[in-house]
Amino acid sequence: CISVPKKLRAIETAKFKKEREEKQKEINSIQKEINEVFIEAIQELREQYPKLTQEDLFYCILQYLRLSTSTIKFCMRVESNQVLTQRKYRIKKQ
């Protein structure tokens, strides 16, 4: 359970592109662990906001962990801040 933040912190502190590429391989593992560690929070969000997608829920958890925008983009496999801004806006509407 505690390994999720450690893995995310490692991504957060990776400075070189090669390091970040190596960390990319861990994203699937991180998503799986987040789903396990935050299962209750995810279920509550799903009950309150049934229109949220799995990616929306993942984004919410990453935001809850107060990760940097660059780490969230990396974990969500998106390139631009605009994609995250649009997701955040869409989630707020729901």
Image: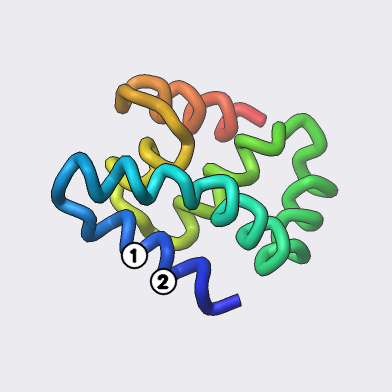
The disc placed on residue 6 is 2
Q: Nearer the viewer, residue 28 or 52?
A: 28
Figure coloring: rainbow
Q: Residue at x 53, y 78 (%)?
A: 2
Pointer 1: what residue?
9
Q: Residue at x 34, y 65 (%)?
A: 9
**On the image, which quarter does residue 78 sit in?**
top left
Badge 2 marks a residue whose secondary structure is helix
Badge 1 marks a residue whose secondary structure is helix
Cβ atoms under marks 1 and 2 closer than 8 Å: yes
In x, y percent, where is residue 19?
Answer: 25, 50
Q: Nearer the viewer, residue 13 or 70?
A: 13
Neighbourhood count class around disc 2 (C-alpha, 10 Å): few under 14, some 14–19, many 20 upward: few
In x, y percent, where is residue 50?
Answer: 81, 37
- Furthest toward the bottom, the residue is 2
The residue under label 2 is which amino acid type?
Lys
In x, y percent, where is residue 86?
Answer: 45, 22
Q: Nearer the viewer, residue 67 or 31?
A: 31
- Give the quarter of the figure containing the C terminus: top right
